[in-house]
Image (cartoon, grey):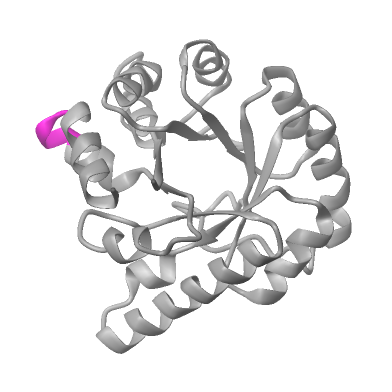
């Protein structure tokens, strides 16, 4: 059964609009757990624009399912991860000026740079996932680096505005999931997935987990967190 990880970053984004204390992403994570999701995803950015160090520390204490920390492969973030010990770290590209992560990590181009962070995380019993574009060369590089998982970037599929492009991007994701699984990697997927486009991705048998944030938080504003999570669970299962 496909697992659902819910990214609660945008709860913190609303909090930071007023630089106050609410809404609290930790409280949101508790509601997500109660609704039956399989895990919580948070992205601790270098500029702390939404999730902050306090959120991460408390989240590690209260999340009873699975905590997936998205982060850049910097020395600061690796030290933070081995202190807090999330269940999984997903290494992502990060640029200060971007609104959201704009594409997959170029594992090939950054192979040497990624070797030490991945080895350090795995030596501390943290499962390592790499957020990559659905590309066979990136998958092979992830395998050589010793990653445990790849998370396939679904943004191009989600943002496609004509059927032919949608089908082309879906096929890339399918073939990449098959290739990654054959190479012994766990496979997850995420970025831009919503209540309309998630079903075809959830049908790919090699994809074990979907990580979804913005669409669930947006729906939760209207109907509540627990119902928004349950609605997504019904679609993917």
Question: For this rendering, which residue is in front, 169 or 46?
Answer: 169
Question: In the current view of this chain or complex, which residue is farthest to the left?
Answer: 223
Left or right? Give the position of 159 relative to 206: left
Q: Is the magenta region chiefly helix, strand or loop?
A: helix
Left or right? Give the position of 201 relative to 84: left
Left or right? Give the position of 12 relative to 216: right
x and y, in percent, of residue 191 in the image: 42, 56
Tell me the residue at 62%/50% (across/down): 92
Tell me the residue at 77%/66% (across/down): 141
Query: Where 126 falls versus 194 (above or below)?
Result: above
Query: Where 106 falls versus 30 (above or below)?
Result: below
x and y, in percent, of residue 79 in the image: 78, 26
Query: Where 85 falls versus 10 (above or below)?
Result: above
Tell me the residue at 30%/17% (across/down): 22
Residue 218: image quadrant is top left
Query: Where 81 falls versus 233 (above or below)?
Result: above
Count of all numbered marks drawn on residues in the image: 0
Left or right? Give the position of 195 relative to 62: left
Q: What stretch of residues is rendered in magenta? A: 220-224
Question: In the current view of this chain or complex, which residue is farthest to the bottom?
Answer: 164
x and y, in percent, of residue 132 in the image: 61, 62
Question: For this rendering, which residue is in front, 148 or 54?
Answer: 148
Residue 110: image quadrant is bottom right
Q: Is residue 168 magenta?
A: no
x and y, in percent, of residue 42 in the image: 49, 34
Tell me the residue at 85%/35% (across/down): 120
């Amino acid at each position: 059964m496909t697992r659902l990880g819910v990214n609660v970053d945008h709860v913190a984004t609303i909090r930071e609009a007023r630089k106050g204390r609410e809404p609290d992403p930790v409280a949101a994570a508790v509601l997500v757990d109660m609704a039956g999701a399989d895990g919580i995803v948070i992205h601790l950015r270098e500029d702390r624009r939404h999730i902050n160090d306090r959120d991460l520390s408390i989240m590690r204490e209260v999340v009873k399912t699975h905590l997936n920390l998205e982060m850049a492969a910097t020395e600061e973030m690796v030290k933070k991860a081995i202190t807090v010990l999330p269940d999984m770290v997903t290494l992502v590209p990060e640029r200060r000026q971007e609104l959201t992560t704009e594409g997959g990590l170029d594992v090939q181009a950054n192979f040497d740079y990624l070797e030490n962070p991945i080895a350090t995380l795995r030596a501390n019993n943290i499962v390592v996932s790499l957020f990559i574009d659905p590309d066979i060369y990136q998958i092979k590089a992830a395998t050589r680096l010793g990653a445990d998982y790849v998370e396939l970037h679904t943004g191009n599929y989600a943002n496609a505005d004509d059927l032919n492009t949608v089908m082309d991007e879906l096929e890339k994701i399918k073939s990449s999931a098959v290739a990654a699984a054959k190479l012994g990697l766990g496979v997850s997927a995420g970025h831009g997935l919503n209540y309309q486009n998630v079903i075809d991705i959830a049908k790919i048998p090699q994809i074990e987990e979907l990580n979804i944030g913005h669409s669930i938080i947006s729906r939760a504003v209207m109907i509540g967190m627990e119902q928004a999570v349950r609605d997504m669970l019904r679609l993917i299962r």
